[in-house]
Amino acid sequence: MDKQSKVDAAYLVGLMSGTSVDGIDAAVVKLSPPAEREQGVEVELLAFENTPFEVQVRNSIFELFDPANATIDKVGAMNMWLGELYAQATLSIIGKSGLSPSQIFAVGSHGQTIYHAPEENVMGDYNLHCTVQIGDGAVIANRTGIPCVSDFRVADMAMGGQGAPLVPFTEYLLFSNPETTLLMQNIGGIGNVTVLPANASPEGVFAFDTGPGNMIIDGLVSQLYAPMTMDVGGEISASGQVIDELLKWMQQDEYYKMPLPKSTGRERFGGQYVAQIMELTRANNWTAEDVVATATYLTAWSIVDSYERYIAPKHQAQQLLIGGGGSYNKTLLRDLQQLFTPHKVQVLTQEDIGGNSDAKEAIAFAMLAYYTMKRLPNNIPLVTGASQPVIMGKVSYPYLGR
Ligand SMILES: Nc1ncnc2c1ncn2[C@@H]1O[C@H](COP(=O)(O)OP(=O)(O)OP(=O)(O)O)[C@@H](O)[C@H]1O
Ligand SMILES: CC(=O)N[C@H]1[C@@H]2OC[C@@H](O2)[C@@H](O)[C@@H]1O[C@H](C)C(=O)O
């Protein structure tokens, strides 16, 4: 890092639109760089906004999750359209922060994942893996006049990694603690955990996707309670009972036993999976609230199962710190508290420690973009499985005529 960057704070915008497809999270942060490489970076959240997707946009994105529907014209058009929406979200949040676009060092945009196949051999004999995030960075840069870093995951995958999860890099920088072993659990569409052992070096950090977060719950609610798309506050599941037979069927999925590193997505727990549950529901005459309660319990179970299988043999954790939209589902929190009590792990949300469950990932992509702009590596190879550190993200520069 050059001498200048050690002292100057930078303003950045972070954009996240995750696997839930609920909308765009946009954050403006002030980043005070570390004095020495990775030690002591500080980030202050200046403004945050979630812009829900209009129904038409959401439906068009969902269409692209099925490779048979994701024709090149639709992918190309949505790549441009999302770029526009991300640019609007960027300008809106900068306005809210009281800054002007010229003060922003860079935008870090995750994009919309429409396909993630870290294991799959997509092209037959060619043994190619891939991950696809759309919402073009060049559109964002040119519409806002701010350099934009986008498409983070490909560089890691090029070096043999899963291209996910990426947030552990920033969680290590922001949350690691000399005395407490923390489990940073995100519950978005997918659930993912970062293990921050007390006093760990970056080599001690590990992370992986625990399985579905809200994806199955959202899918079932959309089918059984349309036009609702989520179980707000966990009220539906609170009124239902877990169906043992369905729970056992869900627990059979091979993902839970797969070795680390691992990551997953809609390809496993999306529309097709929900359609299978709907078939079982009709065949067995299960009630809607019991089915949603079971999917909710499954998510909590997958998190504690991951702890027992991969983490507890190495580390006794003190806290499970939950972020992402799942932290607003009270039934899910209740189930997690119940399941972690025997392990003596305290279950807290980001809000319990003065954080923001919604903003966490957007903040992370602002931070990752900072490292990209400084040409510093920003993956954790032991987390993603990459063979070496890489500088993730592609930079688009606007021409400002000066
Ligand atoms: N008030 C609420 N009550 C219950 N669930 C909620 C509430 N608000 C959000 N959620 C759940 O959280 C989901 C959105 O979470 P989040 O924005 O963290 O996911 P994401 O970033 O899209 O996903 P990922 O992190 O997997 O990429 C919604 O789809 C919904 O299931
Ligand atoms: C391919 C992809 O978009 N993965 C997401 C998804 O949502 C949660 C989990 O699955 C995680 O692996 C990842 O996102 C976060 C931001 C990450 O990379 O850390």
Image: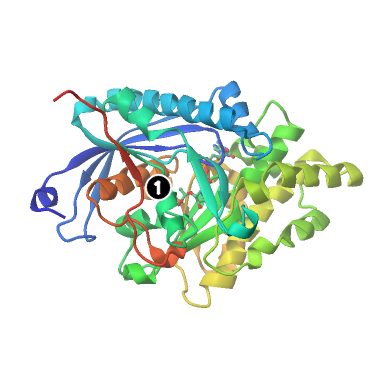
Residue at position x 44%, y 50% from top? 153
Residue nearest the observer in this picture, 205 or 344: 205
Horizontal and vertical percent position of residue 361: 41, 45
Residue 305 image-quadrant placement: bottom right
The one nearer the camera, 159 or 228, is 159
Quarter-of-image position of residue 290: top right
Q: Is residue 101 above or below residue 361?
A: above
* CA neighbours of label 1 inside 10 A, class few (<14), some (14 to 19), many (20+): many
In the rendered image, the quadrant that contains the C terminus is top left
In terms of depth relative to the viewer, which is nearer, 126 or 174?
Answer: 126
**Residue 199 left/right relative to 236:** left
Tag 1 residue? 152
Percent of width and height locating residue 239: 73, 41
Residue 376 appears in the rendering: yes
Residue at the spot 56% in from the left edge and 25% down from the top edge: 57
Image-quadrant location for residue 379 = bottom left
SS label for mark 1 = loop
Q: Is mark 1 within 8 Å of ligand 2?
A: no
For this orientation, the residue located farthest to the front is 125
What residue is drawn where x is 70% and y is 36%?
Answer: 221
Residue 238 falls left or right of residue 362: right
Q: Quadrant of the N terminus?
A: bottom left
Return the x and y of residue 390 as percentages of the image width and height: 34, 58
Amino acid type of the residue tagged 1 in the rendering? Phe
Q: Is residue 287 left or right of residue 365?
A: right
**Residue 361 placement, left or right of 233:** left
The correct choice, above or below, for 47 with respect to 376 in the image is above
Q: Given the current orientation, which residue lies at the most extreme bottom position?
A: 313
Confirm whether residue 99 shows in the render.
no
Q: Picture coordinates of residue 392 (x, y %)? A: 36, 51
